[in-house]
Image (cartoon, rainbow, N blue to C red):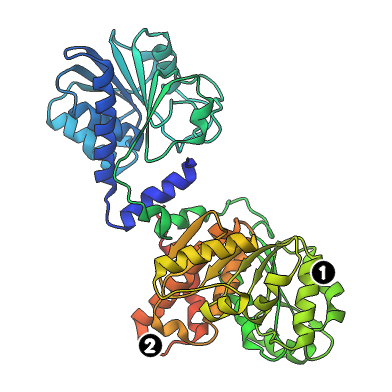
Amino acid sequence: MITSDRMAQVDRNAEALGVPRKQLMESSGNAVARVVREHADPGDQVVVVAGRGNNGGDAFVAARFLDEFDVETILLGRAETITTDIARENWDALQQGEYDAREVRDSADFSLPDCDLVVDAMLGTGVTGALREPEATAAEAINDSSAYVVSVDVPSGVDADTGESAGVAVHADHVVTFHDDKPGLEAVDAPIITVADIGIPDAAELFVEQGDLLALSRDPQAHKGDFGEVLVVGGGPYTGAPALAGQAAMRAGCDLVHVACPENVAGEVQGYEEGLIVHELAGDLLRPRHVDELLDRALDADCVILGPGLGRASGTLDAVREFLESYDGRAVVDADALRVVPDADTEADLLCTPHQGELAAMGGETDEDWETRMDLVESFAGDLDQTLLVKGAYDVVSDGETTRVNRTGNPGMTVGGTGDVLAGICGALASTHDPVEAGGIAAYVNGAAGDAVVDEQGYGLLASDLLPEIPHAMWGGRDE
């Protein structure tokens, strides 16, 4: 089962993998035509009622596969306002082929001809809310008809995710939905549901690709804090790591980033970026005496990034363990802090970001073959009951149930600090997204940023080179 948002991402991922959307539309239309043939006899009157989006485009394709029937296609709206190029191309194909196809620009002009079967292709899975005109009038006419009704992907007016209808909705006899079942169809009154395989490869769901970036959105009316507040707990032996993580979180769109670090490095960390809010911890290392203060600061954070630059002194790791065992929010755990995760009794929701050596230190297994490694990571994540992002040439992200793989990145990113950048991106995204989604997108963005640097200058990159590329990797690759 797949939600409408995830379906849009998978559709875009398929295109990124080399399966054109026009090809998918051709397969979708053919699937609709096959169902029409199951319920109509040659020569029957078939009416296609189509909207101006890709749902309508699927139906335009279907009309070309139904020459044995008397088919009339009705477009609700003006042809020049068809919203996608591929739907418009398929409308034009009907015109060039001199199929019976006409526009209805006003609800007052709509009338449903007498027919044996209606194809409802007005609105698809991406549209919610009450039907507007002329769709509402068309839906009422379809419902009043005695014709058999085949809906494309979801009955128009029905929310594909909830099954709810804000007003009139088409009463379908048969729904042809694509790739996977939709949650809302369970609530539709007992239609026949056909899930059609339209050629989307399994890789479009497994590999993180450009379509996953569609999950990133920003409300124009948003206020400060709506996109997350992150607390980085790091530093002491090292200064660059917490600074890189904090800056990366900012570049990834986090609104506010706090860094809690030992006082001996606080000034240096602040010097990297004026926008970081730096809090000094007494002494030169994280110690158990700091835990209460960190827990207080974590109350205002949407996500804590724990580990960059902390080192592995026994008192430091004791403090990490105490923090995790008292914290019940969301945290990204990186670097030496990962060592305490398997034995920590925590209610926190963790996104752990080990490389393969750190994974082994945690008690996990790895393998040179990425598919074998994927299975091992999935199993270990299930045992931990946490989310893992295991870094490698193929990054594996899993919570034990959902597993994603990222392929961006390059050998130049073996330089120190790129993991801290990844942790920062993870923290920003985990503030507003579930850990698997956050980890997958973060891995993709981090790798894409590194690829952009190497494309520009070759190897010899610095971790800080990734920072200005993060926004381009996140937003430049989106399909608006």
Q: Are marks 2 and 1 in contact (CB under 8 Å)?
A: no
Q: Who's the residue at 83% across and 90% down the image?
A: 283
Q: In this image, 37 relative to 396: left or right?
A: left
User: 472 or 183: nearer the eye?
Assistant: 183
Q: What residue sits right under mark 1 in the picture?
A: 295
What secondary structure is marked by label 2?
A: loop
Distance of label 2 from label 1 (alpha carbons):
41 Å
Q: Is residue 449 visible?
A: yes
Q: In this image, 61 relative to 49: left or right?
A: left
User: 10 or 89: nearer the eye?
Assistant: 10
Mark 2 closeness class: few <14, some 14–19, many ≥20 residues within 10 Å: some
Up/down of 308 relative to 253, above or below: below
Residue 353, x across and y down, in percent: 58, 72
Residue 47, x across and y down, in percent: 27, 17
The label shown at residue 443 is none
User: 192 or 478: nearer the eye?
Assistant: 192
Residue 447, x across and y down, in percent: 44, 73
The label shown at residue 459 is 2
What secondary structure is marked by label 1?
A: helix
Q: Who's the residue at 17% across and 29% down the image?
A: 95
Amino acid type at circle 2 is Tyr
The mark closer to the camera, 2 or 1, is 1
Q: Is residue 444 visible?
A: no
Residue 423, x across and y down, in percent: 59, 73
Q: In this image, 300 relative to 138: left or right?
A: right
